C-alpha cells in the first residue's frame, strides 16, 4: 500500500524532538487499532478503499469489505446526495469517526493518491468506463456485473488492465463459492467424461432497443447530477423511473441507454461458470442460434452451450448443469449439488447457500496484496461477457450468427458487426 513520506529539515526536527520529549514524559495511550491489535490490521497493512455508485447491491458488497480487518474505507462517490450521505454514515459508524469523504464526481475520488482500490457498483451504463478510468488512475478495481455493455467495451476493459497492471475482479462471486467450484472441478478434471453440453440460466432472452420515457422536472444538481448519471449513455430527459432502476418493464433494453438486457444480466454469472467448466476462459463459442425459446451455442471443441429458462432442478437461482459422456452435475444458489452418481459427490464439502460475496472479496484483497490474478480477472470477464453479447446479437437479429473469437468479429456479417459497439457521449470515450 502507498505510504506518505514526511520530510523534516534540521530546525523542524530539533523542535519536534523537544516536543516529543515533553510528550513522552507524560502517560500516553495508543489505540490498539493503531498497533494492528483489536482485530484490525496495522494502518500500513490496510488497503484504502473508495466506492463509486453504492446503492442496494453496492451496500451489501461494501459490507463484505468492511468486515475485512485489512480494509479502510475512506471515500464515497455517488451522483445522488442521499446515497453519498448514507454510505458515509455507514463507514463513519463502523470506524467511530467522521473521516469518510464524499464526492459527486468520480474523477475527484480517483485523483486521490492515497486510495489503493475502488468498489464500482454503479449501473451497467458506467461499469466499463469507470473501471478503465480507475485503472488509468492506478487503482485496483472490484466491479459489479455486468461489467460491459458490448463486445468493444469488453475488449477495451481487458486491454486497460493488461496495460496498467492493475488488479481487477468482476463481481461474479459464484466463482468463489464451494458448490460451484466443486461442480466445475468435476467438469475440468474429466470425472464427467468428455464434456458434451453445458447449461446456463440467463433469466431473460429478450432484447430490444432502449425506450424513451417522458420528461420530468430535473432535480437540483446538488441532489442528483443527472448529466453525470447519464455519463457515456446517449442523452435523454430526466425521468425518476430511469434514476431509480432501469429495466425492460420500464421501457429499457439491450442497446442505447442503461440496460444490459437479454442473456447478460444472469448470463454474466451462469455463462461465466460454463466458460470455466469448459476450460474456455480465453475464448468464446463460434456459433449462436436462437431456437425454441432457448439460445444454442457451440464451441470450437464441439461442446454445446444452451441458455434456457426452464427445465431446472429446484436448487435455487442461477443454476448451471454440466453433462459429459460419463455423468452430469447440477447446482445453484441453495448450495446443494445433484449428480448422476452419488460417487461424484463424495468430497463435496459443507453446504454454503445464499451466494455470499465474502469469499470473492477476500480473493480480490489477497490479490491486491500479492499482485496475482483474481478468479474473475479482466481477461476472464472480457470473454464471458463477449459470449453473452454475441448471444444477445443473435437474439436481437433473430437468427444464427457465426463468431470469430480470435478476431472478435462476425465474418462477412455486416449487420451483426455493427452491434459490437455503440457510440459514447463526450467526454467519456476511453
Image (spheres, helix red, strand yellow):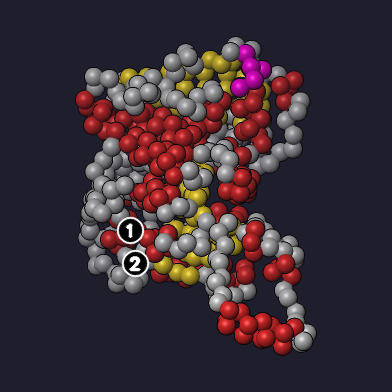
Residue drawn where x is 64% and y is 61% of the image? 44
- Asked if the magenta segment contains residue 223, the reply would be no
Q: Are marks 1 and 2 in contact (CB under 8 Å)?
A: yes
Q: Give the label on residue 224, or none.
A: 2
- Element carrying mark 2: loop
* Residue 179 horizontal side relative to residue 98, left or right: right
Q: Earlier in the sequence, mark 1 or mark 2?
A: 2
Which residue does the numbered mark 1 point to in the structure image? Answer: 229
Please tell me whether residue 375 is drawn above or below residue 257 in the rendered image. Answer: above
Quarter of the figure with residue 351: top right
Please tell me whether residue 348 is drawn above or below residue 367 in the rendered image. Answer: above
- Asked if the magenta segment contains residue 190, the reply would be yes
Main SS of the magenta segment?
loop
Picture coordinates of residue 407 (x, y %)?
33, 24
Please tell me whether residue 56 is drawn above or below residue 333 in the rendered image. Answer: below
Picture coordinates of residue 397 (x, y %)?
27, 27
- Element carrying mark 1: helix
Region of the chain picked out in magenta, as a range: 188-193
Please tell me whether residue 90 is drawn above or below residue 259 in the rendered image. Answer: below
* Residue 307 horizontal side relative to residue 350, left or right: left
Amino acid at each position: 500500500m502507498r505510504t506518505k513520506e514526511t520530510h523534516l529539515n534540521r530546525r523542524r526536527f530539533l523542535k519536534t524532538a523537544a516536543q516529543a520529549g515533553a510528550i513522552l514524559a507524560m502517560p500516553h495511550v495508543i489505540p490498539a487499532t493503531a498497533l494492528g491489535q483489536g482485530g484490525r490490521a496495522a494502518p500500513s497493512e490496510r488497503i484504502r478503499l473508495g466506492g463509486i455508485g453504492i446503492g442496494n447491491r453496492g451496500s451489501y458488497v461494501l459490507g463484505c469489505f468492511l468486515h475485512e480487518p485489512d480494509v479502510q474505507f475512506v471515500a464515497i462517490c455517488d451522483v445522488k446526495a442521499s446515497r453519498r450521505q448514507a454510505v458515509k454514515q455507514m463507514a463513519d459508524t463502523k470506524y467511530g469517526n467522521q473521516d469518510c469523504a464524499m464526492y459527486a464526481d468520480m474523477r475527484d475520488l480517483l485523483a486521490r493518491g492515497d486510495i489503493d482500490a475502488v468498489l464500482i457498483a454503479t449501473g451497467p451504463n458506467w461499469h466499463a468506463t469507470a473501471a478503465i478510468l480507475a485503472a488509468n488512475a492506478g487503482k485496483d478495481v472490484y466491479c459489479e456485473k455486468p461489467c460491459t455493455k458490448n463486445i468493444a467495451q469488453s475488449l477495451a476493459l481487458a486491454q486497460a488492465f493488461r496495460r496498467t497492471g492493475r488488479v481487477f475482479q468482476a463481481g461474479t462471486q459464484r466463482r468463489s463459492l464451494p458448490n460451484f467450484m466443486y461442480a466445475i472441478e468435476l467438469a475440468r478434471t474429466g470425472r464427467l467424461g468428455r464434456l458434451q453440453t453445458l447449461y446456463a440460466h440467463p433469466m431473460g432472452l429478450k432484447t430490444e432497443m432502449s425506450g424513451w420515457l417522458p420528461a420530468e422536472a430535473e432535480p437540483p444538481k446538488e441532489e442528483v447530477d443527472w448529466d453525470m448519471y447519464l455519463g457515456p449513455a446517449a442523452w435523454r430527459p430526466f425521468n425518476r423511473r430511469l434514476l431509480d432502476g432501469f429495466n425492460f418493464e420500464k421501457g429499457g433494453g439491450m442497446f442505447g441507454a442503461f440496460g444490459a438486457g437479454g442473456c447478460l444480466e444472469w448470463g454474466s454469472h451462469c455463462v461465466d461458470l460454463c466458460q470455466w467448466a469448459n476450460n474456455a476462459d480465453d475464448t468464446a463459442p463460434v456459433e449462436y442460434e436462437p431456437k425454441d425459446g432457448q439460445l444454442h451455442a457451440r464451441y470450437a471443441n464441439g461442446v454445446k452451450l444452451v441458455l434456457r429458462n426452464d427445465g431446472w432442478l429446484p436448487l435455487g437461482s442461477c443454476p448451471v448443469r454440466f453433462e459429459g459422456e460419463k455423468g452430469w452435475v447440477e447446482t445453484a444458489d441453495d448450495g446443494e449439488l445433484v449428480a448422476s452418481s452419488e460417487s461424484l459427490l463424495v468430497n463435496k464439502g459443507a453446504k454454503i447457500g445464499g451466494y455470499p460475496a465474502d469469499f470473492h472479496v477476500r480473493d480480490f484483497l489477497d490479490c491486491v496484496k500479492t499482485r496475482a490474478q483474481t478468479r474473475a480477472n479482466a481477461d476472464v470477464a472480457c470473454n464471458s461477457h463477449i459470449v453473452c453479447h454475441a448471444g444477445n446479437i443473435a437474439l436481437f437479429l433473430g437468427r444464427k450468427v457465426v463468431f470469430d473469437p480470435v478476431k472478435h468479429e462476425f465474418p462477412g456479417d455486416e449487420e451483426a458487426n455493427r452491434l459490437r459497439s455503440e457510440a459514447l457521449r463526450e467526454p467519456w470515450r476511453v
